[in-house]
Amino acid sequence: MLSESLIKEFKTIVGDENVFDNEADRQCYSYDSAVLDAVVPALVVRPTETAQIGLVVKLCNENGLPITVRGAGTNLSGGTIPDPRDGVVILTNGLTKILEINEQDLYAVVQPGVVTAKFAAEVAKRGLFYPPDPGSQAVSTIAGNVAENAGGLRGLKYGVTKDYVMGIEFFDVNGGLVKTGSRTVKCVTGYNLAGLMAASEGTLGVFSEIILKLVPPPRASKAMMAIFDDINKASEAVAGIIAAHVVPCTLEFMDQASIRYVEDYTKAGLPVNAEAILLIEVDGHPGQVEDDAARVEQVLKSTGAEIKVAKDAEEKFKLWEARRNALPALARAKPTTVLEDATVPRSQIPAMVKAINDIAAKYQINIGTFGHAGDGNLHPTILCDRRDKKEFERVEHAVDEIFDVALSLKGTLSGEHGIGMAKSKWMEKETSKATIDFSLNMKRAIDPKNILNPGKIIGG
């Protein structure tokens, strides 16, 4: 437990009302969206001014207190679970200002706690576009997106969060303000620290301000649903669309289990008897949209798909709302939902889908698979009950095999959910011992006391 005098020092920095030390409050920040054991922090601190972040970090470092920074807690790999050694959680929900939206130079400057969807909506009011759209965008924060390098439905064409980070200001472990990147299109001043901080999961510094690139919105778009009576044909169609040199804005996959759960939840009119569906959208100049849509439809017809084109904005909205509700719909089925993030080269989607289904049968578990098939990022979602120890042992074995298959197909452990605590044990298998050693050496140099989100990504 922290001493009263130390707690008083935190209160002096951020104010009494922004320090939470009672049991009930601390319990609220003991877990995230990963299926891992909760850890109750010793203290929760809520800065409301960016300068306060540096003072809080400095005080924690001086007293050897582990820090976990938390936005909305939507993390799916345990990245925001506190350290068990008198950990301090720093909340960013008191730092929610959009400081600037520059329409002339196409950038914005935000504080770390800005909610992604709200930011995108404000940008859209200015006739501009911020493409990254993680499934949790209605609640997730920009700093969390950067820390995890979040992706989303539009990642196939527009890239992920790191592709829109122009600069970051963050506090180092000593409370010093580090500035990297700029508001200019080109900047090669010093090391690319902003690139280093993307996907760092709070292990190297605490963000205080982020500069984000904006782009003009597409002038037209066309959305469609492709319905398949054979799941293998659906996954082959994904590879076929990419091979036809068409890059849709979105190319999403849902298997029958996912379709049934989502339709029961959303009543969106999905074909519950289909073995699989693809949800596809192309965007850009009107002429290009029509050409790309025609080429996509040609590929789909060659695989025997039934095609339904959204007639208007309302139908298109229903399609994408259905897809965005895949996780909450599946999560209603069983007490425990294990959402994974296996990602493979796009040409290997058919092999990965088949492997997931074979693994589900082998371990007699229920897996619904959906995801960003166009960029190879699948989300096999295991529906189970963690209280059933025998079932959960089978689940753990299944997860091991899913990642083994993904790596054997030249894939990766995570396309967008991060490593956190949940996947750190597989890191060396994907990379190398030298990679882990290099990362640990860098971490020790930056954070000698190992207080910045310890135990995440590379352990330690």
Image: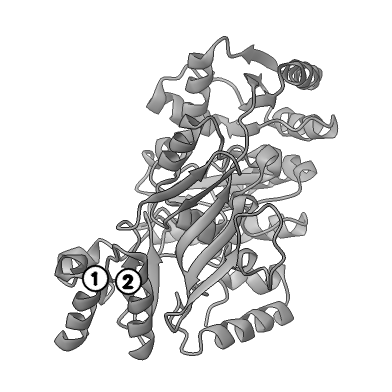
Q: Quadrant of residue 194?
A: bottom right
Question: Mark 1 — residue?
Answer: 14
- State the residue in front, 296 or 21: 21
Element at label 2: helix
With 49 as the anchor, is 368 left or right in this view?
Answer: right
The residue positioned 52% from the left and 16% from the top of the image is 313
Q: Quadrant of the N terminus?
A: bottom left
Do callouts 2 and 1 mark residues in contact (Cβ within 8 Å)?
A: yes
Above or below, comparing residue 140 to residue 5 in the picture: above
The residue positioned 37% from the left and 51% from the top of the image is 97
- State the residue in front, 247 or 395: 247
On the image, the x and y values in percent for residue 382 come to 49, 48
On the image, the x and y values in percent for residue 30 come to 30, 66
Residue 52's disc is 2
On the image, the x and y values in percent for residue 23 come to 16, 70
Say how the picture is coloured: one colour
User: Mark 1: which amino acid?
Assistant: Val
Q: Is residue 49 visible?
A: yes
Q: CA distance from mark 2 to mark 1?
A: 7 Å
- Residue lying at the far top of the rendered structure: 311
- Callout 2: 10 Å neighbours few (<14), some, many (20+)? some
Above or below, comparing residue 271 to residue 426 in the picture: above
With 8 as the anchor, is 70 left or right in this view?
Answer: right
User: Mark 2: which amino acid?
Assistant: Gln
The residue positioned 56% from the left and 87% from the top of the image is 444
